[in-house]
Amino acid sequence: MKFLELRIPPLLLMCIFMIAIWLSKDATTPIEIPLWFKLVLTSFFLISGTFVCIAGVIAFRKANTTVDPTKPETSARLVNSGVYQYTRNPMYLGFSCWLIALCLYTANLLLLLFVVLFILYITYFQIKPEERILKHLFGQPYLDYCQQVRRWI
């Protein structure tokens, strides 16, 4: 399965999962959630996800390093400021929030299984390979950072 590592751009992967969630929304009966509550929860995850993604991109831009997750070996510097003080993968966390928002919008909580699959895929085929490369590039400072900041939250 090593051939899947760093192959599918995470944004494309998230879009694929969004389409799968949307196409599966009628596969089971949605739960009854008051509209106002559904909108509040959906908005919370959508806004939070957007904020975290944008904060991650801004931190990378400020550090003048690559945002391209398929080429972590081109990273110019270790970014551990801003949102990266709280999560090592803010963009993937943001994508997961967007997927959760869509599941809440459809009111079909069974679709949260797609979010779990997304997180598992992105962890094993994107994050872990990135971590191996960043460990090689930045050595002990990266290992220290990993001890201080969790992978997700």
Image (tube, grey):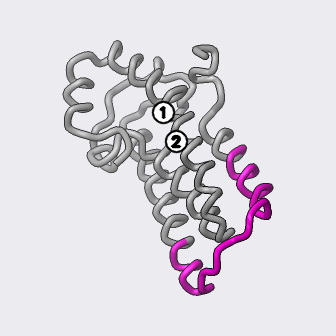
- Image mark for residue 67: none
Q: Secondary structure at mark 2?
A: helix
Point out residue 78 in the picture as x, y percentages from the top left corner: 32, 29
Judge left or right: residue 142 versus residue 69: left
Q: Is residue 96 above or below residue 36?
A: above
Q: Amino acid at mark 2?
A: Ile
Q: Label 1 belongs to which residue?
A: 123
The residue drawn where x is 54% and y is 82% is: 37
- In front: 95, or 72? 95
- In front: 51, or 87? 87
Quadrant in which residue 26 is drawn: bottom right
User: Which residue is farthest front?
Assistant: 29
Q: Amino acid at mark 1?
A: Thr
Contact, mark 2 vs mark 1 (Cβ under 8 Å): yes
Judge left or right: residue 112 versus residue 76: right
Q: Which residues are magenta?
A: 16-41
Q: Tell me if mark 1 has few (under 14), some (14-19) or many (20+) residues whose alpha carbon lies within 10 angstroms of its own.
A: some
Q: Secondary structure at mark 1?
A: helix
Q: How many marks?
A: 2
